[in-house]
Image: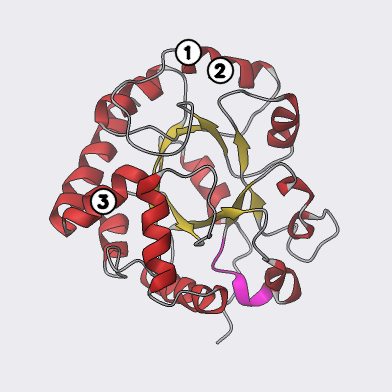
Amino acid sequence: MRVKVRAVNRLDELVRNGRPILVCYMQLGDPAMPHDLVDIYKESGVDVIEVGFPCAAPHLDGPIVTKAMSRALKAGMTIGRMWCELKTLRQRCPDTAIVVMSYETLDLEDICNRPDEYGEIDGVLLIGADSARSPLFAESGPVASRLHRIGFVSHEMRPEELEGAARSGGYVMLQAAPGKTGLRKYFDPTNAEKVARLRASGIGQPILLGIGISNSDHVRKAMVSGADGVVMGSACIVHAERGSESLQRFIAEVRSTLDETR
């Protein structure tokens, strides 16, 4: 099946919309996150679904995401099957932006070889020191004009990360808490300074705080810090494990909190 490629990237449309951006993680292939949860994401106001490609050694991810990836791998998830799952996901939510998240070691060259078949993807977030050098993002490559490389800036805000973020598209994800992904009790007050520093460096893309953003209080503080939205990962997995009603209530509360900050 070939998917028709849209002329306009959904992430660009999202920026023009102007409302705070909500990105929620979904581990396709994880029995705890079946396909029908996508309907909850769509109906509860999620702007971007961040789909995790399972990795055997996800060095930035804590136990919650790592276990979700492990469950997906044990359930038989492969790269080939993942692309099929993405097409099913797109059919269920044709207007919601989809960003693939993985590590630089994952072979994503199939997108370069057959770009027209992957029009359901709006962006890719690759974690790793050399991710910006991936052939996927070559300026003369076949997907350069239709696929955004999502910028990532760690808590340490390394100079090379700032440089890479300035060349990215869609949005920039700023690590909101040190260490690996996971739930946190406290929100780091230095995030306001970090967001301001990114702006001062010339980054004009939306800046989203992610990693450690665990509840609505964190979301509110993220917006007060000057962020344009948030990325919710481990918290979404935890609520999905508790059941669809728990996930729906959680996302609806986060969406409401974001909208109150407009």
**What is the three-letter code of the residue carrying label 1?**
Thr
Rounded to the nearest angstrom, the CA distance separating label 1 from label 2 is: 6 Å
**What is the three-letter code of the residue carrying label 3?**
Ser
Residue at label 2? 194
Q: Residues within 10 Å of mark 2 (few under 14, many from 20)?
A: many
Q: Residue furthest left?
A: 245
- Residue at 30 percent across and 43 percent down: it is 235
Q: Nearer the viewer, residue 40 or 244?
A: 244
Q: Is residue 160 left or right of residue 59?
A: right
Is 142 drawn above or below residue 158 in the view shown?
A: below
Residue at label 1? 190
Is 7 drawn above or below residue 161 in the view shown?
A: below
Rounded to the nearest angstrom, the CA distance separating label 2 from label 3 is: 29 Å
Residue at label 3? 44
Which quadrant would residue 147 be assigned to in this image? bottom right
**What is the three-letter code of the residue carrying label 2?**
Lys
In the rendered structure, which segment of residues is drawn in magenta? Answer: 116-121
Label 2 SS: helix
Q: Residues within 10 Å of mark 3 (few under 14, many from 20)?
A: some
Image depth: mark 2 or mark 3 in front: 2
Image mark for residue 207 = none
Assess whether residue 75 is covered by the magenta stretch: no
Q: Residue furthest bottom?
A: 1
Disc with the residue nearer the chain's start (2 vs 3): 3
Q: Residues within 10 Å of mark 1 (few under 14, many from 20)?
A: few
